[in-house]
Image (cartoon, rainbow, N blue to C red):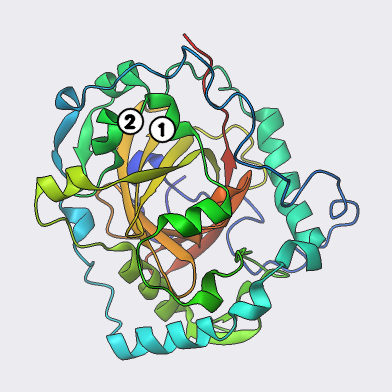
Amino acid sequence: MDRPLRPQTLPGNLRPGDRPGIARPDRPGIGDRPGIGDRPGIGDLPGIGNRPGFNRPGWNGRPINIGDINLGNNNIINNRPGWVNIDNDRLNNIGNRWQNQIGDLRDWGTRYPNRLGYWNGWADGVRSGWRHWHHHGWFGPDWWQGHQHPWCGWHYGYGFNTRPWGYWWTYPAYGALVNWFTWRAPAQVWSEPVYYDYGQGGNVVYQDNSVYVAGQQVATEEEFAESAMDLATVEPPASEAEAEAAEWMSLGTFAISSGEQDVDPSRSIQLAVNKQGVISGTLFNSQTDAAQSVQGQVDRNTQRVAFRIGDSEDIVVETGIYNLTQQEAPVLVHFGTDTTENWLLVRLEQPENE
């Protein structure tokens, strides 16, 4: 499963593979299959994120001792890779064109239920085929002891001293998330959730070496990948005290499916966001039993999220912050400027009490 045209070992076996039909986000006909668009129970369910059982008594109060698991910082993830040559003028132009399309991205699931049905059908395949549902203790106190890895400068692990380990499996409703941030952001961007849907029939589409958001050309393919990596590359905190003072909101834990046939994925990811919009997390590969740090950022002008993984200077993942409050989250994975693929994050339930 080496990456096309550039064989290498990617973090956590994060490799795209060559399975038919999953390699490009602009496949014709995707999302338009009959019979998958009108399933009941998909979309914005009332009370999502606040279901009973998220705070089961006795199962999530055990503390995590970060002194035993913090192995120092991964500094590579803070440095902009050499292949990212985009300048601020082009970044601003992309941002302005993108922000002008925000209105056409709202209420996406109501207007295009077949698209939510497509992602839900993919996720149902994972929910049926995944063989790790008894993931006792994943990302819990004992788990961290056995999966030590270099943290990023910004790491939600500093919050382990103030939150029980079960907290990091929970996730917010959109309104709580909007009120979480302390930044100044355009009200017209955040007044309603924006759902990012990748591929033909979606609202972020690749065509003729350009990327279109809600029908508006915003960038070339190369510029789009570079802008994602630029967003995902975050300056480290000025000191460890600043990192320790950050407050983190959990976005939950997901299985990572790299294609519709990948129904038993070995990779999972836990994510959190701080009040300044920095994304932190951990990627775990159950096949290799290896963990990697995740770090990135939310764009306050578009609700776009981009994050990097481990010490890779090529891979950057993007989605929308609202996507990460849902049961399944479409994501776009960039492998440098050469290859882009549609993947899906499928939300996992918290482990049972051990």
Callout 1: SS: strand
Left or right placement of residue 266 versus residue 26 in this view: left
Image location (x, y in percent) of residue 96: 46, 87
Residue at (43, 31) in percent of width and height: 167
Classify residue 164 by image quadrant: top left
Q: Which kind of residue does numbered mark 2 sit on?
A: Ala
Q: Residue furthest top?
A: 354
Disc 1 crowd rating (10 Å Cα; few below 14, some 14-19, many 20+) is many
Vertical relation: 233 (above or below) 239: below
Residue 290's tag is 2
At which x and y percent is residue 298? 40, 63
Give coordinates of residue 104: x percent, y percent: 67, 79
Instruction: Residue under label 1, please give it.
Output: 285
Q: Which of marks 2 and 1 precedes in the sequence?
A: 1
Contact between labelled residues 2 and 1, with CB atoms less than 8 Å apart: yes
Q: Find the distance from the CA under tag 1 to the CA under tag 2.
A: 5 Å
Residue lying at 88% horizontally and 53% vertically, measured from the top left: 38
Is residue 26 positioned above or below 77 on the image?
Answer: below
